[in-house]
Image (tube, helix red, strand yellow):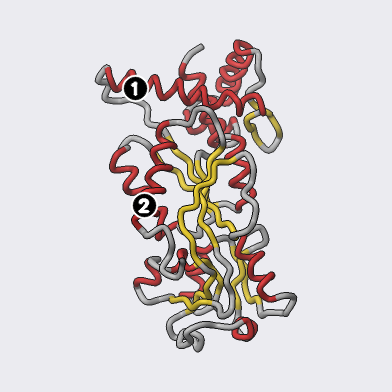
Amino acid sequence: MRTEQLEYIAAVTRFGSLRRAAEELRLSQPALSETVRNLERELGVDLLERKRSGATMSAAGRELLPHMAGVLEAVDRLRAAAGEQHRVSRMVRVGTVNAATVPLLVPAVRAFRADHPVTQVEVVGAQQADIHRALSEGGLDLGLVNHLEGDDMPAGFESTPLLSGRPVLCVRPGSRLAGRSAVTVDDLLGEPLIAMRSGYVMHRYVHRLLGGRAASFAYSTDGAEMGKLMVAEGLGATVLPDFSVVGDPLERQGLITCRPIADDGTRVLLVLRRRRAESVPRAARDLHDVFVRTARELGGTSPGGA
């Protein structure tokens, strides 16, 4: 068994296909495929499920993935102890629903990189179900997702609440609703709304809030970041957790603001999730700790939270 075989398996997991992994590793796809098959024969386990859409870790492979990561980390420590200056950098992959990309994720990643200059952080925007799937399969190390307080936490993950806030209406400062101390559901019905697509927690929350009443949904989009940009451009208003708006560069520049929704006690949590495993890569553990520390520095709750 060679360490590069484990590196190759890790690359296939990250990129979701043998082709993309081969391009990243600068290998031919047949050479990469044969190397992986040699490791599978040596271990007596099918590590990958090969489909037309790409290769993903098998159930057996997911069980072995933490052990492979542990071996690679041990090799890194050995190289560092020997004074090797060109050791292979690791990658930590974080999935996010974009609800706190700027106010929380960016300072956390900046702090992490200060202590881990050779570790690359890859941020992947996706819906919550896709983040959970990638965490289970080993394609992501950490996931930032929204969670409505009172909903059950999914099994199979370690869930750490980072921020707690309330839903707000994100509008332009010049909007007719920006002068209100709070907005009502009737106010929402008279405003062009930018909705999150189905699959996002805020999509479910808005439809529950409206209670079957027909709103003027002018646009729908993937993720809060695009929603905020569309609000700043005057295309309408959108409903987001307040921790997604307060501290955002657009809010600091005076291009967007937010108002609470009257008579609504819903709480939204920003939760950091990772797959339950006996062994977690050190870089992923360290980034997890940085997220927790950064959230604590932000107060653990948003300005509108309890």
For residue 93, above or below residue 87: below
Q: State the image quarter where residue 40 is shown.
A: top right
SS label for mark 2: helix
For residue 212, above or below residue 201: below
Q: Amino acid at mark 1?
A: Arg
- What x and y, as percent, mark residue 35? 56, 17
- Left/right of residue 143 with respect to residue 120 in the rendered view: right
Q: Earlier in the sequence, mark 2 or mark 1?
A: 1
Which label belongs to residue 67? none
Look at mark 1 in the image and give the residue it sits on: 77
Q: Disc 2, disc 1: CB below 8 Å?
A: no
Camera-side mark, 2 or 1: 2
Q: Residue at x 66, y 20 (%)?
A: 46
Query: Considering depth in this image, is 156 or 61 the residue closer to the camera?
Result: 156
Q: Amino acid at mark 2?
A: Thr
**Residue found at the very far front of the displayed protein:** 306
Which label belongs to residue 294? 2
Q: Residue at x 35, y 71 (%)?
A: 252
Q: State the image quarter where residue 302 is shown.
A: bottom left
Q: Residue at x 48, y 14 (%)?
A: 2
Q: Label 2, label 1: how many angstroms apart (C-alpha)?
A: 27 Å
- What x and y, as percent, mark residue 39? 58, 15
Q: Residue at x 25, y 20 (%)?
A: 83
Q: State the image quarter where residue 75 is shown.
A: top left
